[in-house]
């Protein structure tokens, strides 16, 4: 009985909250501060033409640095939780012929698309996160087609790939302290530096995101 | 009511549904889904409320990009934990908590 | 040149742990202890330099990217920030030394301890320096996910279940906080605290009040304020001792610090009407948490419930908090004293469990003979929790009593005194048990289950406990530091 009461209470509370908040949204005056002109004025100096990428990697680049740290922490969380040192159950036989064939065609195309997205991020929607996500999806697809095995404890090479993006970003950010502030790009080299950071990030993000999937899909297979 | 305000109200509804789900649901997988809905709702509110006068604003869009990545990270950890818990308790593995490191 | 040193100190205090955490991961499972310890020594120096600069020259700030707020992200260090940074580094260093000896080589819990601990400390340091509510969201996530990972690491079902419960509570809190940020940005067009504080006044639209409510609710969930504490006892009680120490001493303080910042900063004009709520919940935490600590048979769970109770003191003071009030110093001092004492207590509990192989209060019997230093550390930590002179805990509670008496909040006075008495009950529960002799049938049991204790562990526990007691002697400078940028 009290479980039903609790359910009802929470649902009613959520509904009342939603009603109250939605109502308050209509009473809002126009915002006091408008960041759009600030972004457009400083866009030329930022080294990037697309405003969202400029905000992400230049104006609010510190958030992005911390965000990569969040991803690494999440990967560490996955590794720490799952039991160590199980050999991956390599299940390379598949009755299905279509999926592996399709994946073999799709994966290189996805790689190409990802490289394009990485480069295009400077002028259009795109950038390191989108490219990294696409690459990770390619790796997940290959695993689902039984073409690559799941991952167990990462070896040194994989570990280097996982942290490389973060270390490059951190190194550039702190070296730029000599310019006066953390992550303060000199306007002449900003575009180049950001591209370098984004390239390293793409590799790392692809590996981290793929890792989130591939490490979990390995848990407990060998122990029965 | 502009179209952005419709998005904002939808975002609030999604948040409420997701929050209720995270509190009430028992199964970990469903709670993960509920939390994702809640996060998506907050992100929708962030973007649409800022653009309620119709012109696109890059700053909240960049913030939402960050928010989505954070949500993916959290989902990964939650799934690993749920998986491990399932393996441990499903196998009948006991978890005596006394005095181990 | 001095300005550059300040910039290095301010930035270094979070970039150094980020660096060694990533390198520790690179080195492989179980490695990275020496990186962590040397990095923490560097961080301690940087925190001291920053504190000295803030005391001498006033609050420091740093605009990342060279852009200022509201376009860019600002970092800000006033006295409160500097004090919390000092607490974090002063507790982290001995706990890392402790952890190095505590984890047996190859133990599953230690495989990823060092990189996770590094990111945890980096996240907390970045949180204390942040001056931007969205940046704070990202740092909250780093701290939260790292804490969850540390609890679950290599663990059995109880630990994983506790970690999962904590994760969902933390995510619910972060989600609410994020919606609050969304509403604030929608209303004002900025997420920078320095820009927002002058803009929010008593005539703010209702959405802003709802945003404040959401953000505080989310943060109170993360700081385990009663009745949102449900996740804490299992999470802190079941984790390995060094992890419990880091969690109880430092991680919960981060969320409470944020409550303080938002209460006294941007939302100051809106909160006075609801100030009695955290006060009431804090009182509930003290009474309920102490009662559970007195009753529980398990040692680590006792210390975890004590955390729930002691955090109540911090929230109890919220009705007394107004911008510019000296009570802020008392609250911060209480947080620092509790951080040191709780870390010492968990360290001592960990040693006792290591030695006896059991996690019950009953089997603490006989510890007085075998581990006198550890017991002394536990008792000293208890002195600070009870509020006996000359400990930091005593001075903090004294100042709180003073403020409560001056403003006529008799209920707060009563609860503070009651809390001290209740703390004495559960501390003496353990200390008394240690002087009893172990029943004969359990002696053999313990010989099998227990292990010898490295000296380092005992000295680290003792050091932390001594620091929490001697804190009272240094508190004048500390209160002066906290006042910078906060008191007129």
Image (spheres, helix red, strand yellow):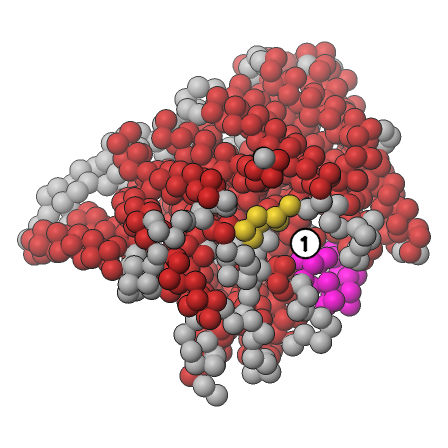
Chain containing the residue with disc 1: C
- In the picture of the structure, the residue carrying the numbered disc 1 is C261
Badge 1 element: helix
Q: Is residue C280 magenta?
A: yes
Residue C134 versus residue C384 in the image, above or below: below
Indicate the position of residue C429 as horizontal and vertical percent values. 77, 29
Question: Magenta part of the protein: which range?
Answer: C262-282
> Residue at image x 47%, y 81%?
B53
Q: Quadrant of the N terminus of chain A?
A: bottom right
> Residue at image x 36%, y 34%?
A83
Q: Is residue C327 visible?
A: yes
**In terms of secondary structure, what is the magenta stretch mainly?**
helix
> Residue at image x 73%, y 49%?
C485
Indicate the position of residue C467 as horizontal and vertical percent values. 73, 26
Q: Is residue C234 visible?
A: no
Q: Is residue A12 left or right of residue C402?
A: left
């Amino acid at each position: 009985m009290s479980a039903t009461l609790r359910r009802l209470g929470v649902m009613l509370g959520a509904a009342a909250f939603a009603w109250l908040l939605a109502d308050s949204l209509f009473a809002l005056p126009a915002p006091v501060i408008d960041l759009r002109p600030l972004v457009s004025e400083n866009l030329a100096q930022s080294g990037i033409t697309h405003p969202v990428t400029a905000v992400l990697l230049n104006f609010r680049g510190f958030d992005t640095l911390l965000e990569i740290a969040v991803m690494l922490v999440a990967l560490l969380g996955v590794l720490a939780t799952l039991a160590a040192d199980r050999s991956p159950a390599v299940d390379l036989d598949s009755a299905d012929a279509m999926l592996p064939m399709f994946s073999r065609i799709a994966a290189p195309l996805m790689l190409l698309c990802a490289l394009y997205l990485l480069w295009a991020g400077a002028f259009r929607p795109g950038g390191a996160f989108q490219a990294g996500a696409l690459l990770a999806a390619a790796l997940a697809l290959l695993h689902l087609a039984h073409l690559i095995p799941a991952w167990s404890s990462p070896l040194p090479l994989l570990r280097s790939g996982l942290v490389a993006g973060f270390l490059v970003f951190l190194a550039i950010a702190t070296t730029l302290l000599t310019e006066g502030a953390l992550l303060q790009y000199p306007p002449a080299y900003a575009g180049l530096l950001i591209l370098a950071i984004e390239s390293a990030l793409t590799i790392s993000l692809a590996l981290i995101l793929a890792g989130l999937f591939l490490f979990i899909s390995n848990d407990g297979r060998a122990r029965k | 009511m502009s179209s952005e305000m419709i998005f904002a109200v939808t975002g609030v509804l999604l948040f409420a549904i997701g929050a209720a789900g995270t509190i009430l649901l028992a199964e970990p997988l469903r709670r993960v889904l509920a939390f994702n809905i809640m996060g998506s709702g907050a992100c929708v509110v962030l973007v649409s409320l800022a653009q309620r006068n119709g012109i696109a604003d890059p700053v909240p869009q960049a913030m939402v990009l960050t928010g989505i990545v954070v949500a993916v990270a959290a989902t990964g950890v939650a799934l690993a934990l749920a998986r491990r818990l399932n393996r441990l308790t499903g196998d009948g593995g006991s978890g005596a908590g006394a005095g181990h490191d | 040149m001095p300005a550059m040193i300040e910039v290095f100190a301010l930035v270094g205090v979070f970039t150094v742990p980020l660096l060694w955490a990533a390198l520790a991961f690179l080195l492989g499972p179980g490695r990275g202890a020496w990186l962590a310890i040397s990095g923490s020594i560097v961080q301690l120096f940087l925190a001291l330099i920053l504190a000295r600069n803030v005391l001498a020259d006033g609050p420091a700030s740093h605009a990342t990217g060279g852009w200022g707020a509201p376009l860019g992200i600002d970092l800000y260090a006033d006295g409160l920030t500097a004090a919390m940074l000092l607490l974090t580094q002063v507790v982290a260093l001995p706990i890392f030394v402790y952890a190095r000896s505590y984890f047996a080589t190859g133990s599953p819990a230690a495989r990823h301890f060092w990189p996770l601990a590094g990111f945890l400390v980096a996240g907390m340091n970045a949180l204390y320096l942040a001056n931007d509510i969205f940046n704070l969201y990202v740092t909250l996530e780093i701290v939260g996910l790292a804490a969850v990972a540390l609890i679950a690491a290599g663990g059995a079902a109880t630990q994983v279940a506790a970690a999962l419960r904590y994760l969902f509570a933390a995510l619910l809190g972060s989600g609410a906080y994020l919606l609050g940020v969304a509403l604030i940005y929608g209303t004002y067009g900025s997420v920078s605290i320095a820009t927002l504080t002058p803009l929010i006044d008593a005539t703010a639209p209702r959405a802003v009040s709802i945003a404040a409510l959401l953000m505080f609710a989310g943060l109170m969930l993360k700081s385990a304020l009663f009745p949102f504490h449900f996740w804490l006892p299992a999470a802190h009680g079941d984790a390995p001792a060094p992890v419990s120490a880091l969690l109880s001493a430092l991680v919960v303080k981060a969320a409470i610090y944020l409550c303080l910042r938002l209460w006294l900063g941007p939302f100051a004009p809106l909160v006075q009407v609801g100030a009695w709520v955290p006060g009431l919940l804090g009182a509930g935490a003290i009474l309920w948490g102490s009662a559970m600590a007195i009753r529980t048979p398990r040692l680590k769970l006792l210390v975890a419930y004590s955390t729930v109770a002691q955090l109540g003191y911090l929230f109890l003071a919220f009705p007394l908090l107004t911008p510019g009030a000296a009570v802020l110093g008392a609250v911060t001092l209480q947080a620092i004293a509790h951080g040191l004492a709780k870390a010492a207590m968990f360290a001592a509990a960990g040693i006792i469990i290591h030695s006896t192989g059991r996690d019950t209060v009953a089997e603490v019997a006989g510890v007085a003979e075998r581990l006198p230093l550890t017991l002394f550390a536990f008792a000293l930590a208890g002195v600070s929790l009870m509020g006996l002179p000359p400990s930091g805990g005593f001075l903090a509670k004294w100042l709180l009593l003073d403020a409560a008496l001056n403003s006529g909040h008799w209920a707060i006075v009563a609860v503070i005194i009651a809390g001290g008495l209740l703390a004495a009950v559960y501390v003496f529960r353990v200390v008394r048990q240690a002087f009893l002799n172990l029943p004969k049938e359990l002696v053999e049991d313990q010989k099998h289950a227990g292990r010898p204790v490295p000296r380092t562990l005992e000295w680290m526990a003792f050091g932390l406990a001594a620091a929490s007691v001697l804190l009272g002697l240094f508190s004048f400078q500390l209160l002066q530091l906290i006042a910078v940028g906060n008191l007129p």
